């Protein structure tokens, strides 16, 4: 599982930073959080397989988080995509895409499901993971998201399995799932001693754009990695809050209070030509903070 910050700027693109988009790659699936202008170009520059795109989660309808979506959806129509694509976002997203389609600027030839989120909580799940949302505090309705993998089976002791002569195949899968297996020679092997205790699932939260708010703490509760906006430094704290944003210190405090293990700062204002001051500010609150650059990759072990 890894997170790629595709666009890390705020408001408008610059030569150094594209507008907001972050990808999550998980076990062969890709999820996109926000889709600022030219996100598809950033996807091409990234190592991601965007044919594997499962879902797009749009936080809010400000252009710096959204202008890339029609372009991306249209380009997927020029390929061979046949799989369903889900797009989640706030009310108004369906209308936004409908106008693009009605004016013929956007043509889609694969199954697309657009979900306008109405309430906080669980919005999407499979056997392996769940995605939750909660309302953030911005100038317009805005959702933050949390991706939580379900608890994983314990680690499989390959060396011991070889020693016991367990063939590679369905027997091993059964053992990982906690079931005893009968081998060809009649021996019955139990999972105890071969499979470790279940491991907690990995998790990721995405909180853009927002002032400090309790919902961001809920989303980020105990996550392995939190991507949080840090539009400004604390010298602009009042201005930041007035415009529905956070400063780097706010983001780091949220990460610390939520028990997030690692913090990635993004949505950096173009006024910071030396954004390392934001990082220094954040590390005073949460030492495991990093400042995202475009196309940077962060693994979640
Ligand atoms: Zn923004
Ligand atoms: Zn915004």
Image: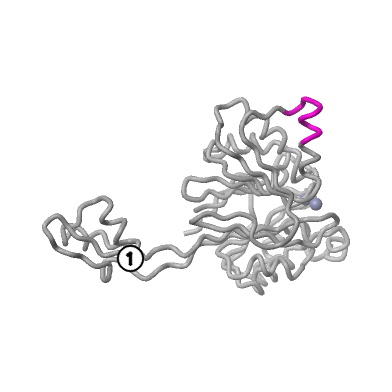
Residue 74 among magenta residues: no
User: What residue would you read off at disc 1?
Assistant: 178
Determine whether the beta carbon of the residue marked 1 sits less than 8 angstroms from the nearest atom of ligand 1: no
Residue extending furthest toward the bottom: 257
Task: Report the side of 58 relative to 83 (left or right).
Answer: right
User: Residue 30's x, y, as percent?
Assistant: 55, 45
Tell me: residue 115, above or below residue 211: above
**Nearer-the-camera pick, 16 or 58:** 58
**Nearer-the-camera pick, 79 or 287:** 79
User: Residue 107's x, y, as percent?
Assistant: 70, 27
Disc tally is 1
Q: Residue at x 55, y 36 (%)?
A: 83
Task: Report the side of 126 relative to 237 (left or right).
Answer: left
Task: Report the side of 261 relative to 71 (left or right).
Answer: left
**Nearer-the-camera pick, 23 or 173:** 173
User: Residue 143's x, y, as percent?
Assistant: 73, 57
Dot 1: within a 10 Å radius of its alpha carbon, few (fewer than 14), some, or many (20 or more) residues?
some
Residue 8 seen anywhere in this rendered image of the structure: no
Residue extending furthest toward the left: 185
Residue 16 seen anywhere in this rendered image of the structure: yes
User: Residue 32's x, y, as percent?
Assistant: 62, 46
Residue segment shown in magenta:
98-106
Q: Residue at x 53, y 57 (%)?
A: 129
Q: Residue at x 76, y 68 (%)?
A: 213
Q: Residue at x 61, y 72 (%)?
A: 259
Instruction: Tell me where residue 14 sits by quadrant.
Output: top right
What colour-coding does the image apply?
one colour
Element marked by disc 1: loop
Residue 101 among magenta residues: yes
């Amino acid at each position: 599982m890894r997170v790629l910050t595709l666009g890390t700027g705020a408001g408008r693109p610059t030569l150094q930073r594209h507008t907001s988009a972050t990808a999550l790659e998980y076990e062969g699936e890709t999820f996109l959080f926000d889709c600022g202008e030219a996100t598809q170009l950033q996807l091409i520059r990234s190592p991601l397989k965007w044919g594997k795109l499962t879902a797009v989660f749009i936080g809010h309808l400000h252009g710096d988080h959204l202008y890339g979506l029609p372009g991306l959806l249209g380009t997927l129509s020029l390929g061979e995509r046949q799989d369903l694509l889900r797009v989640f976002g706030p009310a108004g997203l369906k209308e936004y895409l409908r106008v693009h389609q009605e004016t013929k600027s956007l043509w889609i030839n694969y199954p697309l499901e657009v979900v306008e989120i109405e309430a906080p909580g669980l919005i999407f799940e499979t056997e392996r993971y769940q995605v939750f949302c909660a309302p953030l505090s911005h100038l317009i309705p805005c959702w933050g998201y949390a991706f939580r993998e379900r608890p994983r089976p314990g680690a499989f002791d390959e060396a011991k399995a070889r020693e016991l002569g367990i063939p590679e195949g369905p027997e091993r899968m059964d053992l990982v799932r906690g079931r005893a297996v009968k081998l060809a020679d009649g021996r019955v092997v139990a999972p105890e001693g071969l499979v470790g205790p279940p491991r907690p699932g990995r998790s990721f939260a995405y909180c853009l754009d927002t002032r400090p708010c309790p919902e961001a703490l809920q989303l980020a509760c105990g996550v392995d990695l939190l991507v949080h906006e840090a539009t400004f430094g604390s010298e602009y704290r009042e201005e930041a809050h007035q415009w529905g944003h956070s400063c780097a210190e706010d983001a780091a405090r949220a990460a610390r209070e939520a028990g997030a293990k690692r913090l990635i700062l993004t949505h950096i204002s173009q006024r910071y030509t030396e954004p390392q001051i934001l990082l220094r500010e954040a590390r005073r609150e949460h030492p495991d903070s990093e400042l995202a650059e475009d196309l940077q990759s962060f693994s979640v072990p």
